[in-house]
Amino acid sequence: MSRRNVRQVTAPSPDFYAIDELLEPADIEIRDRVRAFCEQEVTPRINEYWDRAEFPFELVPKLAGLGIVGGTIEGYGCPGMSNVAAGLVAAELARCDGSVGTFNGVHSFLAMQSIAVLGSEEQRERFLPAMARLEKIGAFGLTEPKHGSDAVGLETSARRDGDTYVLNGQKKWIGNGSIADHVIIWARGEDGAVGGYVVETGGREGSLPGYEATVMTGKTALRAVWQAEITLTDVRVPVENKLAECHSFTDVSRMLDRTRYTVAWRALGLATASYELALAHALQREQFGQPIAGFQLVQDKLARMLAEITSMQLMCWRLSKLADAGRMTAAMASLAKMNHAAKARAIVADARDILGGDGILLEHHVARHHADMEAIFTFEGTDSVQALIVGRAITGLSAISGRKPAR
């Protein structure tokens, strides 16, 4: 067995405030099912994929067999789980590996939710069942080389030509974009309105004319999931593949709002894993004649890490309960993402410090979490943008556009 295949050793998952008592038995069953899968199938081998920057295709059918794909979507072969359960799934996958969590997040939430919420019944019936079985992989093509935080300014175009739409433009940072069968491309129509178009690429073996997806290389985070740069050159999409209920960028924003809460859960997952690993290491590692867990500086770090994780757990649970009740707002989701990404980033850094030199070796897993957290800190809205969304909600004034005041 190679050193990178060393089995992950962790302390018990923290539940300092007995938060499990707030969870429904069905939600706990889903969480524990995913946790067992991760411990048995993902952790023993993910470091090698991450090190080689390869996507673990072997895990896709196993993930399909878990019965979690599609998250909160009801029907069409999807589990229709609660938002709490969906959050727990996101946290458990991230606790194991950020790349696997990102793959499922893009597929189950961004791609499938777009079809479920903005598609017609015919489109849901046509696309979702195969996606729920992971026979077809989905991607969400919004970000462009010149438009990240200001995605509303997207330049990809869609022109009607008979019974097809012709798409032209570029996309960047598209998770699953090089392997997906169904890529939701957001493009501006001839009337200036943004619409969603399901581009059927044919998957890994496909050769859709005009669709070119290149895997981005040189990443230092989420190396085991592939993001792509996509070029669309006169790509023809059947009229019936335009999402029926998407009429403006406001609808696109709705999708981001609906999925952003799961990113907060994913930040919690990485923070939890890092805390567990740091505690286990501190109890085992001896220096100056005793375990380093007995030193004041280490205990101070561990106590503060646990305090942040506990507050994150409570915030995630409450946010998902509000989502289940239909009361979650965009600002609520942004507040959680902003808070959790920053707190998790600090927790992972402290864990890396507690592990000392071992903290930069993949075999101890914290190094991977430390790197992956940098991506989670940025995607689905940077820290600054999330703060401005919350600021707009509490002041009634928008500071996002950056427009200069009129002279």
Image: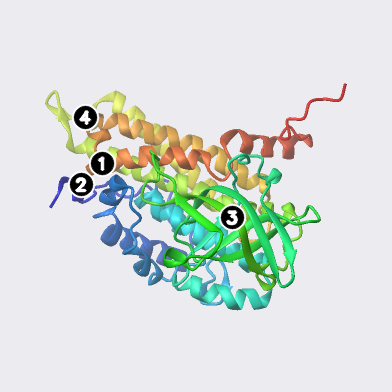
For marks 2 and 4 on the same chain, the one whose residue lies earlier in the sequence? 2
Cα–Cα gap, marks 3 and 4: 55 Å
Dot 1 or dot 2, earlier in sequence: 2
The amino acid at mark 1 is: Leu
- Is 281 positioned to the left or the right of 70 in the image? left
**In the image, residue 167 lies at what x, y percent?**
65, 58
Three-letter code, disc 3: Leu
Which residue occupies 44% across, 70% down?
134
Which element carries disc 3, helix, strand or loop? strand
Q: Which mark is residue 292?
A: 4
Callout 2: SS:
helix
Kind of residue at disc 4: Ile
Residue 202 in the image: state x and y as whole percent: 49, 68
Q: Are marks 3 and 4 in contact (CB under 8 Å)?
A: no
Q: Counting other residues with Cα less than 10 Å from the Cα at mark 2, is it few (<14), some (14-19), or many (20 or more)?
A: some
Query: Crowdedness of circle 3 by 10 Å Cα count: few (<14), some, many (20+)?
Result: many
Which residue lies under the disc numbered 3? 232
Name the element at disc 4.
helix
Q: Position of residue 37 (x, y in %)?
A: 32, 63
Residue 343's x, y, as percent? 47, 35
Label 2, on which residue?
Answer: 4
| Cα–Cα gap, marks 4 and 1 | 21 Å
Mark 1 vs 2: CB contact within 8 A: yes
The mark that comes first in sequence, 4 or 1, is 4
